[in-house]
Image (cartoon, rainbow, N blue to C red):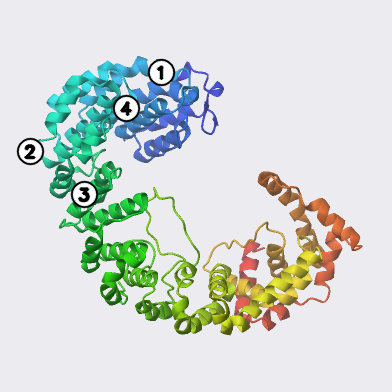
Amino acid sequence: MGDALGDVDWSRLEHNYGDAADVPGLLRGCASPNVKTASDSLSDLSNKLFHQGGWVCSAASAALPGLVDLAGDPAVHGRHEVVELISWLAGEAVEVSERFVDAGWRPALDRVRSRLLALLDDADPAVRRAATSLAADGIRHPESIAMLRRRWAVETDRTIRIDLVGALGVVFAWSQDGALGECLRALVTDDDPLTGLAAVHALAVSDPAVATDKVGLLISGVLNAETEQYQASEWVGPSPAALVHKTGSLLLGDPVAATAFARGVARSGDAAKRVAALRHVQQVLSLWRTTTEELLPLLAAHLDDESPEARYQAAALLACLGERGAPYAEQLIARTTDHSARESRSATTVGDAAVWALARQQHPGCVPGLVKRLSGSSLGFSRAGSYYDRTIPALEQPAIGDVLIPLRGHIDALLDAVIARLIKARRDAVLALNLCQVIAAWGPSAAAALPVLIRFLDDIEFWQHVNRERLNGTPLYYPVFLQRKAERCAAVIKAMANADPGGILFHCGAGRDRTGVIALLLLTLADVEPQAIAADYALSAEALRALFAAMGTVDQEPLIQAVLADRGTTVEEAVMATLEGFDGEQYLRTAGVTSSELHNVRSRLANLHPH
């Protein structure tokens, strides 16, 4: 590999991050006897040659012989990952427009084709699996057909045989080889359920109608397949849910077939498959915007599933169906106190979804649950809306505002809890806005909330004053902010005082105004001279120039200088005027910062410069 690498002028080639002079070193690193060095080098090389795809760079063409050397050397660590990288590149060359493929790629691939196809006979099963995918999709040549069929005849590893079935389907799609098609059709009735399932998938690559004609076989294959032993498979995927999703996607074009598949798989004894079946129901509903009578009893039945995630999915899908779920209101009411958390990083519970479903029906049974959530620590709903494309199988709680606004018939029972939550949300602008929108939508019936709303107007008046007087972006902003927002300034200092050991990042939109106020307070606590604080602030002008350029916006500095000139002052003078007679420690004490918190902040500042 070394001689070949030296024959290339790598600096004239490019990869995703610039010139490719570093590629030879990374290729050599991949051959290192040290596992970590080899792994890190391959990871870096993959990122530079492939990254997220979209093109095949000139460095990839030049690196291909070296990659093939690595893939064929039994002493190299992670050889199957090297083959996977080659497969990604070769697959991308097939998928993207010709103008995005380096002119040297196809000749380079032709030169190493026989060596790559020979990897189908490698002693390492992981290498054979990766080579199967490469041969099927990345090397579209008659030799690939012959080699894959020969491998099918001799392969004994069950996992690789399943992957070979999928690979033969990909090859049949681009080759339309008659003998290959006959082979796949014969495998549909194989004694092994997973082989038959894989054969249907393989045929569906070129003829999607095959799947809708074989719904019963697909259900049987998914229910009976022993997926655990196939987790290493490129085709089956890492979990039973992956197999359900992959198979269900074949049927999404036919709502009747898709519904039948969901009903069949939902009776599985495997909780993961049942949950996956309900996620398939979500995709059907999202795609077709309608439901069949068979789906409602299916969802209701899973309200009592032993799996919390299945119960959540069932309740949430009934919520999506709104009044269509009304026959199951009593079951949902029983679930409003189900505190089991769903299988996600959020703290969302089954009960949250049940409350949502009842709210969508405008059923009074939702009221106690909503009042409890508005009054408690866990809201149970998003603070703001999250919206997903219908092709994304995400099922999340909606914004609290979206749930509450339609419940005008229950205002009397909900208003006090909404007002109480709005008061607590004063420092949570997103949630406060959501709740304000609820009150606005409820209209005169929510008049009792007016005293709370008026408090929020104080902020509006402040910012109107700042903008009217052209204070934003200038240090003229500091005195009025310090006067009106002492509580907020204190909250930041308190958070710093009580933070875990280590660095603290504090910032705002651009890093000059609100960030500058906090920096000023910190510097006064550190007994920094006013002139030095003013000089520190002046650094913002140069630092922000690059930010404005990156954002494609006009540099604000000339405007700021013009405002200051109109007032007969400069940046430094305005900062000095703010600091004149200003006692930062007393200001923060008055705003609620304790002596111990001031000590903690000062200690952190002192540790920055121990000398």
Q: Is residue 577 left or right of residue 378?
A: right
Residue name at image x 52 percent, y 82 percent: 420
**Residue type indicated by callout 3:** Phe
The residue positioned 28% from the left and 52% from the top of the image is 280
Q: Amino acid at mark 1?
A: Arg
In this view, the mark in front (2 or 1): 2
Q: Which numbered disc covers residue 193?
A: none
Foreground tag (2 vs 3)? 3
* The quadrant where residue 513 appears: bottom right
Q: Which residue is mark 1?
A: 106
Camera-side residue: 602 or 319? 319
**Image quadrant occupied by the N terminus:** top left
The disc, 2 or 3, on the residue closer to the chain's N-terminal end is 2
Residue labelled with disc 2: 191
- Tell me where residue 454 appears, x and y as whole percent: 65, 80
Q: Nearer the viewer, mark 2 or mark 4?
A: 2
Q: Amino acid at mark 2?
A: Asp
Secondary structure under the numbered disc 1 in the rendered image: helix
Tell me the element at label 2.
Answer: loop
Q: Which residue is mark 4?
A: 137
Q: Is residue 73 visible?
A: no
Percent position (x, y) of residue 394?
Answer: 38, 55
Q: Nearer the viewer, mark 1 or mark 3?
A: 3
Residue corresponding to mark 3: 261
Residue 331 in which image quadrant: bottom left
- Where disc 4 sits, the SS reads helix
- Label 3: few (<14), some or many (≥20) within 10 Å? many
User: How much space separates mark 2 and mark 3, taking CA atoms?
Assistant: 21 Å
Instruction: Decide: is 393 above or below 156.
Output: below
